[in-house]
Image (spheres, rainbow, N blue to C red):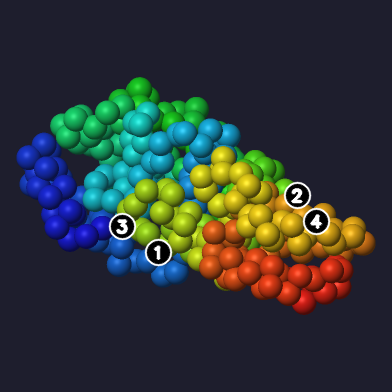
C-alpha cells in the first residue's frame, strides 16, 4: 500500500479508535508487508478471489469488477475485496491452531475494531471473514463465532497444501471448476489449470497495493504463453477474424478452427493446436496477414505458420 494512503487510513483509525489502536494497526500492517518472502497463503487466497470474480464475469460480463487489495492498513487486512455489494475484509490464518480469543490481540477484537472503523468511514455493507487452511479448524471456528462479531463475520476454508499449486488444483474440485471457466481452451487439462492459477498468483503478488480485478487478469495474461481467456467474455472473436484470412482457411480440406475464448484454435486429421497469443495480439494479426499473403492450400502448409 502506498505510504500516503496508509498514513491517511491510520489517521482515521486514530480519530475513530484512539492513538494506541492506530499504532497497533500501523505495526500490524508494517510487519505483514516486511515479512513477505515470495508467495504466501494470503496470496493464494487473493488469487482464488480473483478467479471466483472472473468466473462470475464469464457468466455475466455486465457485472462490475471489484477492487482487490492485499496487506491493507487496518485490523483485518490480509485481503480486501471492495465491490458493488459491499466490502469484505479477510484475515488468513495458515496455522495448526487458531482461536478467536487467544493472544494479546485476539482475532475477535480485531474483527470488532475493523467493523467499527468501517462504520466510521461509512463503508457500505462491511463484512469480515476468517480464512483457515484446515477442515477441522474451519468446523471448530465456524461453530463458535463470538456473538460480538457474528453479525458480520463468516469462516472460510481454503486449503494451502504447503504452497503447492499442483496439489491445490489436483485436490480441490471447486477450484478446478472455477479455473476451467478461465482457461483459454474449452476442456483444459490439469496442467493447463495449474498454469491459470500460477498466472493469477503471479499477478496478485505484483498488485498487492490494490487494483481492479480486471487489471489483475490483464497482467496475468502477459505471461508467455498466455494462460487465460480474454475478457470481456462476451466478445465473438470468430467475427473479428480478417475475412480474407477466413476465406483462405475455408479452402483447406479437413481443417476445423475457431476463436473461442479469444484464442485461435485448429484441428485436422488428428492434430490440433492453439495459437499462443490472443486474437487481439499483434502477433496473431501478423499471422493472419502471412496466411493471406501466402495462401496455404493444405493443412501441412498452414502448419508452417502455426505453433
Residue pointed to by mark 3: 209
Between the C-alphas of marks 3 and 1, the distance is 8 Å
Q: Which label is found at residue 187?
A: 2
How far is mark 2 from mark 3, CA to CA? 34 Å
Q: CA distance from mark 3 to mark 4?
A: 48 Å
Q: Earlier in the sequence, mark 2 or mark 3?
A: 2
Q: In the rendered view, does 295 fall on the left or right side of 117?
A: right
Q: Classify the position of the C terminus by image quarter.
A: bottom right
Residue 23: x, y in percent? 14, 52
Query: Callout 3: few (<14), some (14-19), or many (20+) C-alpha neighbours within 10 Å?
Result: some
Q: Residues within 10 Å of mark 1 (few under 14, many from 20)?
A: few
Residue 214: horizontal and vertical position, in percent?
Answer: 44, 49
- In this view of the protein, which residue sits in the foreground, 47 or 258? 258
Q: Residue at (78%, 60%) from the top-left corner?
A: 249
Provide residue 126's location: percent of width, then percent of height. Answer: 31, 31
How far across and how far down the image is residue 292, in percent? 69, 68
C-alpha span from label 4 to label 1: 43 Å
Q: Closer to us: mark 3 or mark 4? A: 4
Residue pointed to by mark 4:
250
**Above or below: residue 39 compared with residue 173:** below
Total marks shown come to 4
Lower position in the chain sequence, tag 4 or tag 1: 1
**Corner quadrant of residue 107:** top left
Describe the element under mark 2 as helix, strand or loop. loop
Verify CB contact (< 8 Å) between mark 3 and mark 4. no
Query: How many angstroms separate mark 1 from mark 2 (CA)?
Result: 29 Å
Q: Earlier in the sequence, mark 3 or mark 4?
A: 3
In this view, the residue in front, 182 or 33, is: 182
In the picture, residue 88 is in which quadrant?
Answer: top left
Given contact means CB atoms under 8 Å apart, are the residues at marks 2 and 3 in contact? no
Per the image, the residue denoted by label 1 is 206
Amino acid at each position: 500500500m502506498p505510504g500516503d494512503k496508509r498514513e491517511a487510513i491510520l489517521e482515521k483509525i486514530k480519530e475513530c479508535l484512539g492513538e494506541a489502536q492506530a499504532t497497533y494497526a500501523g505495526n500490524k500492517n508494517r510487519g505483514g508487508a516486511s515479512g513477505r518472502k515470495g508467495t504466501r497463503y494470503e496470496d493464494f487466497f487473493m488469487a482464488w478471489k480473483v478467479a471466483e470474480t472472473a468466473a462470475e464475469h464469464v457468466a455475466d460480463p455486465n457485472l462490475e469488477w471489484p477492487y482487490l487489495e492485499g496487506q491493507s492498513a487496518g485490523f483485518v487486512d490480509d485481503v480486501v475485496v471492495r465491490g458493488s455489494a459491499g466490502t469484505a475484509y479477510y484475515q488468513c490464518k495458515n496455522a495448526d491452531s487458531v482461536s478467536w480469543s487467544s493472544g494479546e490481540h485476539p482475532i475477535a477484537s480485531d474483527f470488532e475494531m475493523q467493523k467499527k472503523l468501517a462504520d466510521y468511514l461509512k463503508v457500505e455493507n462491511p463484512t469480515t471473514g476468517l480464512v483457515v487452511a484446515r477442515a477441522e479448524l474451519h468446523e471448530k471456528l465456524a461453530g463458535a463465532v463470538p456473538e460480538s462479531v457474528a453479525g458480520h463475520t463468516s469462516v472460510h476454508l481454503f486449503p494451502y497444501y504447503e504452497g503447492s499449486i499442483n496439489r491445490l488444483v489436483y485436490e480441490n474440485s471447486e477450484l478446478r471448476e472455477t479455473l476451467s471457466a478461465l482457461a483459454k481452451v474449452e476442456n483444459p487439462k490439469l496442467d493447463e489449470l495449474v498454469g491459470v492459477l500460477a498466472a493469477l498468483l503471479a499477478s496478485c503478488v505484483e498488485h498487492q497495493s490494490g487494483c481492479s480485478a480486471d487489471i489483475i487478469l490483464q497482467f496475468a495474461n502477459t505471461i508467455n504463453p498466455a494462460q487465460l481467456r480474454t475478457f470481456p467474455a462476451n466478445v465473438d472473436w470468430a467475427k473479428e477474424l480478417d475475412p480474407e484470412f477466413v476465406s483462405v482457411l475455408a479452402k483447406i480440406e479437413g481443417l476445423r478452427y475457431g476463436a473461442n475464448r479469444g484464442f485461435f484454435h485448429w484441428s485436422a486429421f488428428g492434430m490440433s493446436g492453439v495459437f499462443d497469443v490472443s486474437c487481439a495480439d499483434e502477433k496473431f494479426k501478423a499471422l493472419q496477414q502471412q496466411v493471406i499473403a501466402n495462401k496455404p492450400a493444405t493443412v501441412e502448409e498452414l502448419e508452417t505458420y502455426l505453433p
